[in-house]
Image: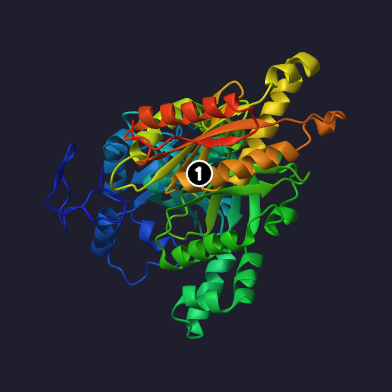
Amino acid sequence: MVAPGTRAPAHSRTRHGPLKQLGAPRRLPHDVGHSLNGEMQGFDDVSFRELVQNANTVVLRWDLQGRITFLNEFGLELFGYTLDEVLGRSVIGTIVPEADTSGRDLVGMINALLAHPDDYIHNENENMRRDGGRLWITWRNRGLRDGDGRIRELLSFGMDTTEHKRAVEALRDSERRYRVLFQSTPIALVERDVSALRAHIDALHGDGVAAIDAYLRERPEALAACLRLVKVTDLNAAAIELFGTDDRAALERFSYIQDHPRFTEIVRSIIVDLDSGEVASQAAEGVIRTAGGVQRHVLVRTTVVPGTETTMSRVVTAMVDVTERKRAEEALRASEERYRFLAVHDNLTQLFNTRYLYDQLPQLLTADAGPCALIFADLDHFKQVVDTYGHLNGSRVIQEVAETIQRCIAAPAFAVAYAGDEFVIVLPGATRHAGTAMAAQIRARLEAHEFLAEQDDAVRLSASFGVAAYPEDAADMHGLLAAADQALFAAKARGRNTVIAAVSGRR
């Protein structure tokens, strides 16, 4: 088959043999060239035969009974026949099927054309080759009239538009599939027409605006004007569910946006990309507000709609609701933080635990670290509190003691819930004298505090303290803890509610 828009060389061979040379054409009816209302006047027979036979257009002559009286070489090649095989045969069943592949009745169409030729000056229909292959041809039909002006035959010129038709159908099919996917996907999709925005950008360039990004940054009102040119053309069911509305006007006002400064940056970036013609995708993450006022965390991606890559006239914004995932992530993060906290803290008092003490204290007792004081504290007669007020209130008292100690110290000092009603306070950089002063302050605070006041009780407590310091009283962690413990034992022996410092001498 010779493709539309090309010309077959006179010397080319086909399944029908060589094309006829000038001067030896196939026999044509003499009056073909004199029947088109004088349009062919001025052509001699040989020139006309050459024009008809070598034209890259189907030339078909047929009578009012639908029988073929002439088909040019191009048409014969296109349909796969010889002239002898088609002369006198009906176009139906020869080059026109009874129905096209969509089921359209072509017999009825041909009968209507023959009955009223003037109503079918142009028509397009599916045709068929000898081997059954289908092709689309756009026809221009002219009536050949007798001396009385009555149409006695038809002369039709056909252009093979199969590839164009297929391209159009492919585009329609692609659009149908896109629409099906658009509506059925569980991801929220909003389609917008940005053609007016693109025209506006082009107009700005025409007015001398070279850098759109700088122009929009300098003029916030210009960005708002750009947004007003963007129109919502469609949104799917998932988007309606996400936003809680199908009000396109509300979506065009971007009423669901929470973080306006960040949104402004994203929109400006999209407009700059549209201007450059390179936008493929823009992604962001943020929080929107539904029509009902509910906040939803979403992943957002804006992409050019397939099929509009050249015009970039439409974009689609996809939004994935990740609210539950975010909540799960935050819960997991909180759980991990809690786990890390509890790994080195006491659950009841929120003070550091002995694991942290044994990990950190050796690092503080080095020649380069300087002095370090350690206080051992033990509540006096705490068992009586538990026996009187119960274990639950006993735990509350322990918590209040821990809070009191924490209010007395500041980093890098730290307190440790050592065991039951025992506490350790570590004072990096402090001497024995400074440690003794701190112990005295804590003792006074505890003695003055009314415990269980929220339970309408007024419990008074005291505590005993032992103080030791590195390097004065010990050379390592175990020695320092032992020295402070010995001092605490001495404080209890002296009658409790007092502070005793370790006796000088390294352990």
Q: Is residue 319 left or right of residue 244?
A: left
Residue labelled with disc 1: 435
The N terminus is located in which quarter?
top left
Q: Residue furthest right?
A: 456
Residue 169: x %, y % from top left: 47, 42
Residue 318 appearing in the image: no
Residue 408, placed above or below residue 391: below
Q: How is the image coloured?
A: rainbow
Q: Is residue 314 left or right of residue 139?
A: right
* Residue 76, image quadrant: top left
In what element is the residue under mark 1?
helix
Residue 302: x %, y % from top left: 51, 51
The C terminus is located in which quarter?
top left
Residue at 48 percent of width and 73 percent of height? 213
Residue at 74 percent of width and 45 percent of height? 246
Three-letter residue code for mark 1: Gly
Residue 248: x %, y % from top left: 72, 52
Residue at 76 percent of width and 13 percent of height? 387
Q: Residue furthest bottom?
A: 208
Q: Residue furthest front?
A: 494
Residue 479, placed above or below residue 298: above
Q: Is residue 277 left or right of residue 121?
A: left
How many neighbours does mark 1 have within 10 angstroms: few (below 14), some (14-19), or many (20 or more)? many
Residue 59, placed above or below residue 104: below
Residue at 42 percent of width and 26 percent of height? 482
